[in-house]
Image: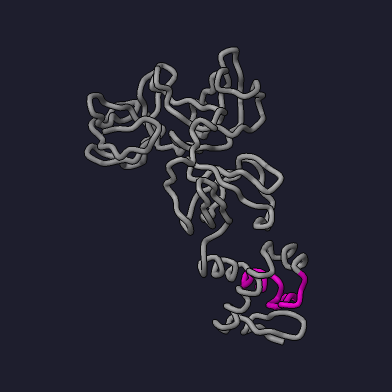
């Protein structure tokens, strides 16, 4: 079964001067010549993205769009008409946003957070700014400590509302955030807690994996600063956050872990790489 708006693995059925035809369920699907990988022959299987061209023909491409059906992504408007707007999503044919699916009239050059969907009437891909109807926390597909993909949705007094795995909403609290984020940013995180249908998330990875990631960051910063950094467990939380982009608690856990691994040593004024010269 082929899926429009998604990646499909299809077999090359026949060649033509203008491309190759791929096996569909009840039709052959054209992969234009400009997108045919060099050396492709009949019988080969190719991973292609399927969508409809301007003449409503199903067509394949090896280009990678910025998002597929179901994804929520930040895209730039490139042109507008009375019927709607067109967004650059990485393919030769721009993605259409009907006027009825815009919150305000879109302006070329501006970026907009949209969900890519398949129009039920036409079967063609389109985008909408009206995302809330696609989001629900009634039947959760995540649990505590699960790694998740996050899209920053909007700012609130306590933090940022984020979209979790294109399905749910959660909160990324200001006191758990040690970097600058903007609406539309796509981030990796994990579920810290679930209370009824309220989900709190944190950036990074859970448990020791999170510490290991921060450890790599500290080692990189040490290498970039000749093997020494003037920070230690007596440094202020503000100093730690400003330089490392992490809480003091995470910093202390991480340098303790690095010390146990004999990757750093402590001095009276900071930390050093274990093999750094005096």
Task: Report x, y in % for residue 58.
Answer: 35, 24
What's the residue at 40%, 21% (across, down)? 120
> Up-down: is 37 above or below 217?
above
* 226 w.r.t. 73: above or below: below
Check the image and report above or below for 29 versus 182. above
For residue 196, above or below residue 153: below
124 lies left or right of 238: left
Q: What percent of the width, then of the height, locates residue 102? A: 59, 23
Residue 203 position, x and y percent, is 58, 56
- Residue bounds of the magenta highlight: 218-236
Q: At x 59% / y 67%, what residue is drawn?
A: 214
Question: Colour mode?
Answer: one colour
Q: Is residue 33 visible?
A: no
Say how many tags the image has.
Answer: 0
Image coordinates of residue 10 in percent, x first then y, are: 28, 37
Which residue extends farthest front?
A: 196
Q: Quadrant of the N terminus?
A: top left
Tell me if 212 is positioned left or right of 228 in this view.
left
- Write the residue at 71% across / 77% down: 233
Is 234 left, or right, of 54 in this rendering? right
Tell which of 266 and 134 is nearer to you: 134
User: Which residue occupies the foreground of this view, 159 or 268?
Assistant: 159
Give the quarter of the image for residue 242: bottom right
Front residue of 35 and 25: 25
Residue at 71 percent across and 45 percent down: it is 157
Can the viewer see residue 76 in this picture?
Answer: yes
Residue 81 drawn in magenta:
no
């Amino acid at each position: 079964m082929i899926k429009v708006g998604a990646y499909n693995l299809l077999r090359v059925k026949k060649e033509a001067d203008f491309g190759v035809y791929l096996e569909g369920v009840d039709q052959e699907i054209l992969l234009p010549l400009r997108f045919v990988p060099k050396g492709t022959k009949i019988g080969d299987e190719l991973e292609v993205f399927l969508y409809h061209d301007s003449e409503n023909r199903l067509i394949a491409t090896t280009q990678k769009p910025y998002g597929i059906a179901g994804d929520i992504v930040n895209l730039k408007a490139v042109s507008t008409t009375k019927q709607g707007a067109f967004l650059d999503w990485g393919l030769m044919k721009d993605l259409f946003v009907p006027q009825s699916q815009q919150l305000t009239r879109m302006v070329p050059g501006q970026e907009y957070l949209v969900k890519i969907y398949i129009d039920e009437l036409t079967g063609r891909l389109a985008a909408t700014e009206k995302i809330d109807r696609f989001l629900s926390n009634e039947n959760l597909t995540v649990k505590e400590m699960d790694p998740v993909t996050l899209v920053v949705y909007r700012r609130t007094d306590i933090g940022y509302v984020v979209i979790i795995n294109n399905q749910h909403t959660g909160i990324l609290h200001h006191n758990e955030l040690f970097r600058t984020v903007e609406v539309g940013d796509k981030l990796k995180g994990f579920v810290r807690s679930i209370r009824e249908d309220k989900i709190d998330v944190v950036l990074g990875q859970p448990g020791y994996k999170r510490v290991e990631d921060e450890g790599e960051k500290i080692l990189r910063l040490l290498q970039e600063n000749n093997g020494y950094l003037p920070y230690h467990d007596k440094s202020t939380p503000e100093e730690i956050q400003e330089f490392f982009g992490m809480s003091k608690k995470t910093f202390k856990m991480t340098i303790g872990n690095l010390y146990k691994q004999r990757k750093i040593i402590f001095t009276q004024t900071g930390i050093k790489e274990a093999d750094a010269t005096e």
